[in-house]
Image: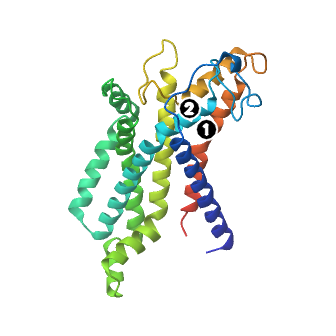
């Protein structure tokens, strides 16, 4: 491996893990409520109320950021794990030479790929009981809809190895089945596909939650689809900021431009994390 590629992979892994750990810590320390309103701190800037300032009711935007992380953390990770599992299964099926199982996976892939993603997601979100508002059902639905792309790429990667001929060749050299499938196939050859697809789905689920939560903020305001009313999404931060941006009051009295900056930073966080993991898992 070239030294430069090695450095890029380690930098990507470090950045990705730091951002993932940051997201986990934010979710862990998320408060149950935003606390009491304090008019004396109304639209306080980050200089007046570190680190992120306050909203129009004087409540810290830090609590918004922490609660938003708690909303998306586990559903997005579960969705990424589902996609990774489907990709691994598709790759192993191609290498094992299980033609009938490979056919079943192709049928599943075609069925899921034919469904309109956003329509299915909206149906799932609206079908949930009003006393159960969670991102998890939406995240699982999105994972199943995104699985065909990951499966196709993993199967193609396994096919480039030679499929069952690759397994037979390694067995002829005396390698055991666990070493062949877990190390040579998954770790060495499917790793880049699996990690990249999983990281992208994690990012997509987070963006999906922000989009769904932003939609219900637009008048007439609707009940949240992905979280309880006690929690605030990152979309709430963006909505506060965009109200300032569209109103033209960028730096005057009552401006919430700091909310817009915070919201954009939070949106960039999963995108940078996904790209970092893609760099870390790049092919040899």
Please tell me whether mark 2 sits on a helix, a strand or a loop. Answer: helix
Q: Mark number for residue 21?
A: none
Q: Quadrant of residue 172?
A: bottom left
- The residue depicted at 38 percent of the width and 36 percent of the height is 138
- Asked if disc 2 and disc 1 are in contact, CB closer than 8 Å, the reply is yes
Residue 284 x %, y %: 55, 70
Is residue 160 depicted above or below 133 in this figure? below
The residue that mark 2 highlights is 234
Residue situated in front as seen by the camera: 89 or 101: 89
Look at the image and name its color scheme.
rainbow
Q: CA distance from mark 2 to mark 1?
A: 7 Å
Q: Could you tell me which quadrant the N terminus lies in?
A: bottom right
Q: Earlier in the sequence, mark 2 or mark 1?
A: 2
- The residue depicted at 40 percent of the width and 46 percent of the height is 79
Residue situated in front as seen by the camera: 148 or 71: 71
Residue 121 x %, y %: 37, 32
Is residue 250 depicted above or below 73 in this figure? above
The residue that mark 1 highlights is 266
Residue situated in front as seen by the camera: 233 or 61: 61
Circle 2 packing at 10 Å, graded few (<14), some (14-19), many (20+), is many
- The residue depicted at 40 percent of the width and 50 percent of the height is 149
Residue situated in front as seen by the camera: 63 or 158: 63
Residue 283 x %, y %: 53, 66
Please tell me whether mark 1 sits on a helix, a strand or a loop. Answer: helix
* Left or right of 10 in this view: 122: left
In the image, farthest residue toward the left: 100
| Number of numbered markers | 2
- The residue depicted at 31 percent of the width and 48 percent of the height is 109
Residue 220 x %, y %: 48, 12
């Amino acid at each position: 491996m070239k030294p430069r590629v090695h450095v890029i992979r380690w930098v990507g892994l470090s950045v990705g893990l730091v951002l993932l750990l940051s997201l986990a810590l934010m979710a862990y320390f998320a408060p149950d409520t935003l606390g009491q309103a304090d008019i004396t701190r109304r639209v306080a800037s980050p200089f007046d109320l570190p680190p992120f300032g306050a909203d129009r009711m004087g409540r810290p935007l830090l609590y918004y950021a922490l609660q938003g992380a708690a909303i998306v953390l586990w559903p997005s990770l579960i969705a990424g794990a589902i996609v990774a599992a489907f990709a691994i299964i598709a790759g192993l099926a191609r290498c094992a030479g299980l033609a009938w199982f490979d056919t079943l996976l192709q049928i599943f892939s075609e069925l899921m790929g034919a469904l309109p993603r956003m329509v299915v997601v909206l149906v799932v979100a609206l079908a949930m009981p009003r006393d159960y508002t969670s991102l998890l059902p939406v995240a699982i639905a999105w994972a199943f809809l995104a699985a065909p792309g990951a499966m196709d790429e993993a199967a193609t990667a396994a096919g480039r190895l030679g499929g069952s001929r690759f397994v037979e060749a390694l067995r002829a050299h005396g390698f055991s089945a666990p070493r062949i499938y877990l190390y040579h196939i998954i770790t060495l050859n499917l790793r880049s596909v699996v990690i990249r697809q999983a990281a992208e789905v994690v990012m997509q689920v987070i963006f999906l939650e922000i989009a769904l939560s932003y939609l219900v903020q637009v008048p007439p305001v609707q009940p949240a689809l992905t979280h309880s009313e006690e929690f605030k999404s990152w979309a709430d931060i963006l909505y506060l900021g965009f109200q300032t941006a569209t109103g033209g009051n960028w730096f005057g009295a009552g401006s919430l431009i700091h909310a817009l900056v915070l919201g954009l930073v939070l949106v960039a966080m999963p995108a940078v994390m996904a790209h970092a993991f893609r760099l870390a898992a790049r092919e040899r």
